[in-house]
Amino acid sequence: MTAYAIAHLRDVDVNAEIVDYIKRIDETLVPFGGRFLIHGVTPEVMERPWEGDLVVIAFPDIDAARNWYASPAYQAILPLRTRNSRSAAIIVDGVSDGYRATDFLAKLG
């Protein structure tokens, strides 16, 4: 099942370190099958205030996403982002094909 790494970036200082991060991140994704779905866009806000940009990277499964984030290649560039932005990052499992919102009810009991 596809998994996603999602980052919410705020107050990004676009300096030499961020440029270096951007130049190097693609190569960290390759061994784990990661690919950008959304990168650095400001969403069209429909409800509540939203501050910053959104990044979504798809991976073949949750293990690939976790392994990418923990990889030496990504860990080497991670401080370039964290030193130069306020950001939050998460990794989540996607849903299977054909999933319906009511499928969530089975998890509840």
Image (spheres, helix red, strand yellow):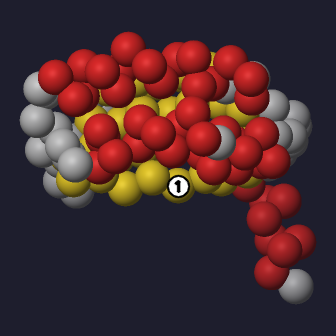
- Residue 49 seen: yes
Q: Report x, y in % for residue 45.
A: 25, 40
- Residue 50 seen: no
Whether residue 22 is situated above or below residue 17 in the rendered picture: above
Whether residue 46 is situated above or below residue 22 in the rendered picture: below
Q: Quadrant of the C terminus?
A: bottom right
Identified by mark 1, the residue type is Ile
Question: Would residue 96 be found to the left or right of residue 69 on screen?
Answer: right
Task: Count neighbours of disc 1 (C-alpha within 10 A) and say few if under 14, some if 14 to 19, many if 20 or more.
Answer: few
Whether residue 33 is situated above or below residue 59 in the rendered picture: above
Q: Determine which residue is flagged by label 1.
A: 90
Question: What residue is drawn where x is 87% and y is 35%?
Answer: 97
Q: Quadrant of the N terminus?
A: top right
Question: What residue is drawn where x is 34% and y is 46%?
Answer: 79
In terms of depth relative to the viewer, which is nearer, 56 or 69? Answer: 69
Query: What is the total number of numbered labels drawn onto the structure image?
Result: 1
Question: What residue is drawn where x is 35% and y is 20%?
Answer: 22
Question: What residue is drawn where x is 74% and y is 29%?
Answer: 32
Q: Report x, y in % for residue 59.
A: 72, 32
In terms of depth relative to the viewer, which is nearer, 55 or 71? Answer: 71
Q: Secondary structure at mark 1?
A: strand
Q: Report x, y in % for residue 17.
A: 22, 29
Whether residue 109 is situated above or below residue 104 in the rendered picture: below
In terms of depth relative to the viewer, which is nearer, 66 or 94? Answer: 66
Q: Residue furthest bottom?
A: 109
Q: Quadrant of residue 41?
A: top left
Q: Report x, y in % for residue 18.
A: 24, 28
Question: Would residue 52 be found to the left or right of residue 77 on screen?
Answer: left
Q: Quadrant of residue 64?
A: top right
